[in-house]
Image: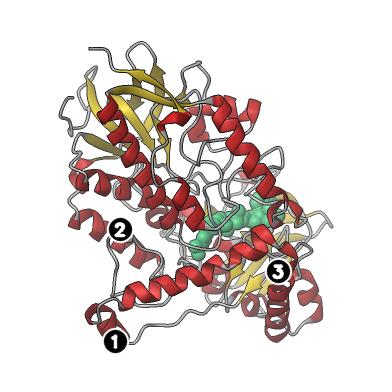
Amino acid sequence: MSEHTAPADAVGAVRHTRILIVGSGLSGVGTAIRLTQEGITDFVVLERGEDVGGTWRDNTYPGAGCDVPSHLYSYSFALNPNWSRSFSPQAEIHEYIRSVADRYGVRDKHVFGCEMTGARWNDTEGHWEITSTRGSYTAEVVVSAAGVLCEPNLPDIKGISGFEGEIFHSARWNHDSDLTGKRVAVIGTGSSSVQIVPSIAPVVERLDVYQRTATWVLPHATRPYLSAERWAFRRVPGLQRLLRGMIYANRELFVLFQAKYPKAAVLLEIVARVKMFLEVRDRELRRKVTPKHRLGCKRMLVSNKYLPALGRDNVELVTDGIAEVRAHSIVTEDGTEREIDAIVLATGFHVTDSPTYNLYVGREGRTLSEVADAEGYQTYKGTAVAEFPNLFLMLGANSGLNYTSLIYIIESQIAYLVDALATMRARDLRSVEVRKDVQADYNRDLDTKMARSVWVSGGCDSWFLDSRGQNATLWPDFSFKYRRLLRTFDVDAYETTPRTR
Ligand code: NAP
């Protein structure tokens, strides 16, 4: 096994590493730390940005924050007693990830400013061949920790490329652009938009919010922590773990009405309707923001400021479809033209059609995208993929959650990876590749569970669904069941190849 941490800078040089991790968001940093804790040092992390943090580094839009409670949204091995609020703002989470990476000494395992441009499995050599903007690597194992919500979805609207004002995506906020006193359009009304709209509404001259589909908005129980509380979190043994456990258990209840008994979501719809009644006095506006689908079908929105912001005199909720973007305006299908200076695209991300899936070429010469197009985007346990030996996806198909902390899932997948590496070492295996029949059975079981979920039966379209209308993103059961499933690496589910000496 070769020792390696240095970047493959030299032209033509190919560096070898045992494990190559792509991306340094919460998954990549968490993996790097756990490998280090296991005494595995022969790995490298390629990161296209200049810092760790992933989505929490990139999403710097005004009002950006997490709608999962702070004390749950942290690594289990690095609790933070100092969160300033019950739900953390983006900058604080980014700082948390940076500080954890520093504390556990994994920053120097990173090659920053290095984008992976391709990864091809070489079945003869039994390793991955990776190209990047900073040279080539070979790796026995690749961990794709590139994130799920990282490739901006830029809408293909007629004339949009000819817009002459400022235009940027929510995840690529242009901080050089001062929106104060400007006429601004925000396209999209998802989780990002509900944080952006109330943040910029008070400073812009006019704000047009373009809504394609209304989504349920629930109350946000956010508040600052008192210094006495933070003191207690630091000093009272077990207090933070207790709170974390209580938050975790409470969030798991969402599984009941999303995956098990969608009709029960009516109870939360009543809460959302009361909130809407209290926050939106204008009947016509209330009609526009009332969703037509079952709550939970799309990702629930959480905000106390969004609906009131829509009622401001300088804000208009536009529900007519966008027909065209012109040099200085947007024209809707009813023929109305609204002059604007800037457009914010809060239009989400490529999830089931992520361009990163084009980068991996498996044992049979097909890319992950080609396999997904032909057979649907499927994995085994959200992390392994048939035809792609020694590849572990972080947050792969059907391992996402939309109600609780994704870090719980990430840590489950890291545990599985660590056990896989130990198994490969102990049995002297060169490669492990999940069996196609096992993957097919696994996905059949998922389909059965999914069939009764709100995501399939709730009457909406969402980024959870792939082009076939199947939910390829979310885990349809309690998250502790997922953890149990990934506790040990089930080598019998895999085709294995012994190492040739
Ligand atoms: P999103 O939820 O996918 O919302 C995108 C919005 O853009 C939707 O309203 C969508 O309308 C609209 N849209 C897309 N293409 C359009 C087009 N061509 N014309 C008009 N409208 C269009 O994206 P997001 O708000 O960035 O959030 C993505 C995910 O990131 C969230 O679901 C969440 O998981 C995560 N997130 C989390 C937090 C947090 O607090 N933890 C905060 C922000 C984001 P339709 O609904 O009709 O498709």
Sequence-wise, which precedes: disc 3 or disc 2?
A: 2
In this view, the residue in front, 260 or 146, is 260
Judge depth for marks 3 and 2 and give the one in front.
3
Residue at x 28%, y 74% (from the top left corner): 81
Helix or strand or loop: what does disc 2 sit on?
helix
Contact (Cβ within 8 Å) of mark 2 with mark 1:
no
* Label 2 sits on residue: 97
Give the image quarter of residue 270: bottom right
Helix or strand or loop: what does disc 1 sit on?
helix
* Label 3 sits on residue: 265
For disc 2, the neighbor class at 10 Å (few under 14, some 14 to 19, many from 20) is many
Q: CA distance from mark 3 to mark 2?
A: 34 Å
Amino acid type for the residue under numbered disc 1: Ser
Helix or strand or loop: what does disc 3 sit on?
helix
Q: Position of residue 5 (x, y in %)?
A: 18, 34
User: Where does the N terminus fall, quadrant-wise?
Assistant: top left
Residue at x 66%, y 75% (from the top left corner): 310
* Label 1 sits on residue: 227
In this view, the residue in front, 248 or 150, is 248
